[in-house]
């Protein structure tokens, strides 16, 4: 049977995950995470929250950051602070009005580097989800479904245009995103939601233009797309789009490991500074919100890789109000003009 999609002239279309099994498992894991006991540490310097299911991994992360406090969350959502007193982690006991060792001494995880990398990756994903949610709230008025399982809606979430709430830009269900428009911004937003939902491969259907826009946006981000075959010229357009999103690159300078360790000692604090500087530049240049979000996401991923490799990023700050360092020669008024300005007596 020929799987070539039939041209569709109705505007809009839909985006679905290629395989639903992994998404169903992820939903089950998400629900399990919500009801199970866990540990949580907020790093205010990097504005990232780290979460783990085991006490030992959280202690490992807290010691890496130099933190002296994190929270234990029970299966009913109650939070209990865990404090480091000396070299011992202790949890306050309100009933006895004293502190007691939080856990019995146990060996650290067998692969601490792998555990820390996993914790960092989950924290970055949570931060990316928060940024995505903020961006979507700026663009749309979101009418949520009446019920959810984990973070997956039962029914439809409606994303309505903020400028005209009577119009629906696209809808979101457990396994499908749908729209009746060929708007590029809507296509980008749908890919945003799909990527946040961890749909690692997308199946797109609908109008030719819609399928092409989703393919282009997903391909720029490295997400595989099924349902659209590029035509002559599409690959060149993809190359230009990738280059356009890399105009505001962050260049790094090599640094000794000791310097890199200091820069990363508080959960990549320098990363936050670099991203804040980049965002300020994009806002100053009036880059559209959709493109700005894509640039920021790419820069964040690039910075994470470079910081993990021990590279430090330096930012040059310029004060436009400061006087120019070059010496300027004072101008002297011409004698004739000076006489002309002399008031007559």
Image (spheres, rainbow, N blue to C red):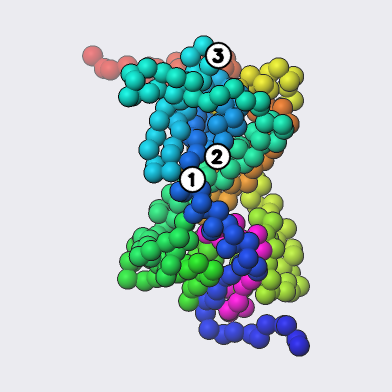
- The reply to whether discs 1 and 2 touch (Cβ–Cβ < 8 Å) is yes
The residue at 48%/41% (across/down) is: 37
Instruction: Identify the residue under disc 1.
Output: 36
Residue 149 in sight here: yes
Does 261 sit left or right of 287 as displayed?
Answer: right
Residue segment shown in magenta: 193-210
Check disc 1 and report its element: helix, strand or loop: loop
Residue 323 in sight here: no
Instruction: Identify the residue under disc 2.
Output: 53
In the rendered image, which quarter contains the N terminus?
Answer: bottom right
Instruction: Identify the residue under disc 3.
Output: 87
Q: Vertical placement of 72 versus 245: above or below? A: above
State the image quarter where residue 91 is shown.
top left
x, y percentage for residue 342? 32, 16
Whole-Å distance between the Cαs marked 3 and 2?
22 Å
Mark 3 / mark 1, whichever is N-terminal: 1
Does 20 sit left or right of 48 as displayed?
Answer: right
Q: Vertical placement of 30 versus 170: above or below? A: above
In the rendered image, which quarter contains the C terminus?
Answer: top left
Q: Which mark is residue 108?
A: none
Does 196 sit left or right of 34 as displayed?
Answer: right
Whole-Å distance between the Cαs marked 1 and 2?
8 Å
Check disc 2 and report its element: helix, strand or loop: loop
x, y percentage for residue 82? 46, 25
Mark 3 / mark 2, whichever is N-terminal: 2
* Front residue (pair 205, 39): 39
* Front residue (pair 149, 210): 149
């Amino acid at each position: 049977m020929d799987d070539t999609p039939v041209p569709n002239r109705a505007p809009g279309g839909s985006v679905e995950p290629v395989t639903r099994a992994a998404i169903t498992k992820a939903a089950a894991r998400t629900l399990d995470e919500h009801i199970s006991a866990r540990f949580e540490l907020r790093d205010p310097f990097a504005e990232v929250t780290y979460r783990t299911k085991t006490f030992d991994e959280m202690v490992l992360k807290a010691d890496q950051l130099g933190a002296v406090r994190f929270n234990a969350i029970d299966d009913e959502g109650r939070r209990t602070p865990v404090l480091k007193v000396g070299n011992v982690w202790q949890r306050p006991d309100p009933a006895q009005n004293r502190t007691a060792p939080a856990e019995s001494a146990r060996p650290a995880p067998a692969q601490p580097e792998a555990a820390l990398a996993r914790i960092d990756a989950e924290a970055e994903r949570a931060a990316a989800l928060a940024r995505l949610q903020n961006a979507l709230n700026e663009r749309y008025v979101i009418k949520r479904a009446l019920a959810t399982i984990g973070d997956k809606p039962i029914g439809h979430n409606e994303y309505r245009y903020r400028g005209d709430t009577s119009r629906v830009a696209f809808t979101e269900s457990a396994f499908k995103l749908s729209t009746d428009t060929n708007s590029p911004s809507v296509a980008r937003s749908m890919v945003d939601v799909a990527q946040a939902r961890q749909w690692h491969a997308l199946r797109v259907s609908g109008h030719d233009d819609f399928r092409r826009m989703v393919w282009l946006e997903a391909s720029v981000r490295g997400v595989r797309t099924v349902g659209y075959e590029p035509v002559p010229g599409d690959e060149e357009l993809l190359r230009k789009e990738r280059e356009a999103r890399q105009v505001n690159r962050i260049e790094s300078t090599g640094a000794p490991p000791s310097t890199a360790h200091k820069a990363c000692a508080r959960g990549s604090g320098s990363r936050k500074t670099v991203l804040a500087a980049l965002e300020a530049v994009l806002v100053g240049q009036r880059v559209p919100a959709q493109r700005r979000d894509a640039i920021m996401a790419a820069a964040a991923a690039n910075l994470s890789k470079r910081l993990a490799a021990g590279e430090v990023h330096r930012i040059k700050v310029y004060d436009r109000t400061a006087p120019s360092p070059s010496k300027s020669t004072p101008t002297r008024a011409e004698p004739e003009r000076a006489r002309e300005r002399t008031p007559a007596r």
